[in-house]
Image (spheres, rainbow, N blue to C red):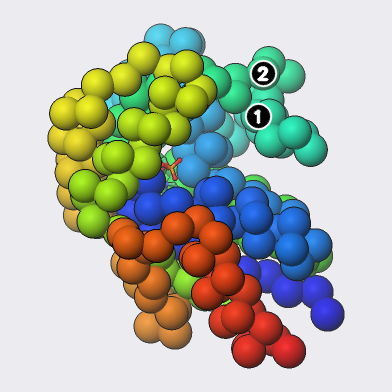
Amino acid sequence: MKLNIAIDGPSAAGKSTIADLLAKRFHLTHLDTGAMYRCCAYAAITQGIALDDENSLYETIKNADIRFDENKDVYLNNRKVTLEIRQNEISMAASKVSTFAKVREALVAMQREIAEEKGYILDGRDIGTVVLPDADVKIYMVASVEARAKRRFQEYMEKGIDADYDTIYKDIVQRDYQDTHRAASPLKKASDAIEIDTSDMSIKEVVEKVSNIITDICG
Ligand code: DC
């Protein structure tokens, strides 16, 4: 059976890593929707578009070509931006551009089109509430700020990205605020989503737990 799975939650809760592993286990394609908002922020910064210029952001992202390959590399208008979009400056800018309804409208349309055929696992902030309200399984993944800051710091070290723990911690707090307080599709748990607190869980434990939920719901 072809499924669509939605994983939502705050920054650095482990959504993308878990979605990737679940995709392999259940033969699904993982779509990292946060990377799409990051591409919008990256395009704005590199093209000199102000981060509060909603109309220009919309025009830019509506006409952009965003692609993912099988190695998880991200391409924006045929340029590989995998590492660039993970920089802290882009994380903050992505959170900012994602507040605009027109930017969300353009990206949600792309995401729905991609997932139309089913067989996808999408991770983001509004997948269960807006992008795929009929998803077969909805997971809402949370973790303490400390646990998330530690994981993100570790991830940056492993990827060779310059990082400072205190800055990461503060930025997570600020992004949580921005993501939950924006007017357009704020981060919130869908009423039919299952919440998992991953603060004290290993990646393997989370994958097992979600896998059991998927099997229970979908057989
Ligand atoms: O998941 P991430 O950290 O890569 O996401 C970057 C930013 O994009 C995040 O601060 C909020 C925004 N985002 C969103 O608003 N909706 C999504 N579906 C995914 C990400």
Instruction: State the SS at label 2.
Output: strand
Q: Secondary structure at mark 1?
A: strand
Q: Mark 2 or mark 1, which has the lower sequence index? A: 1
Q: Which quadrant of the render holds ligand 1?
A: top left
Please tell me in which quadrant of the rendered image residue 45 appears.
Answer: top left
Residue drawn where x is 68% and y is 29% of the image: 73
Residue 190 horizontal/vertical position (percent): 40, 76
Location of residue 60 in the rendering, given as x and y in whole percent from the top left corner: 54, 26
Q: Is residue 197 visible?
A: yes
Image height check: is 128 above or below 104? below
The amino acid on which the numbered mark 2 sits, given as a three-letter code, is Lys
Image-based side of 28 in relation to 96, left or right: right
The residue to which callout 2 is attached is: 80
| Image quarter hosting the C terminus | bottom right
Q: Pointers 2 and 1 in contact (CB under 8 A)? A: yes
Residue at image location 80% in from the left, 62% down from the top: 27
**Residue 106, picture quadrant:** top right
**How packed is label 1: few (under 14 Cα within 10 Å), some, or many (20 or more)?**
many
**Which quadrant of the figure has residue 100?**
top left
Instruction: Write down the residue under mark 1.
Output: 74
The amino acid type, in three-letter code, at marker 1 is: Val
Spatial separation of the CA atoms under disc 2 and disc 1: 6 Å
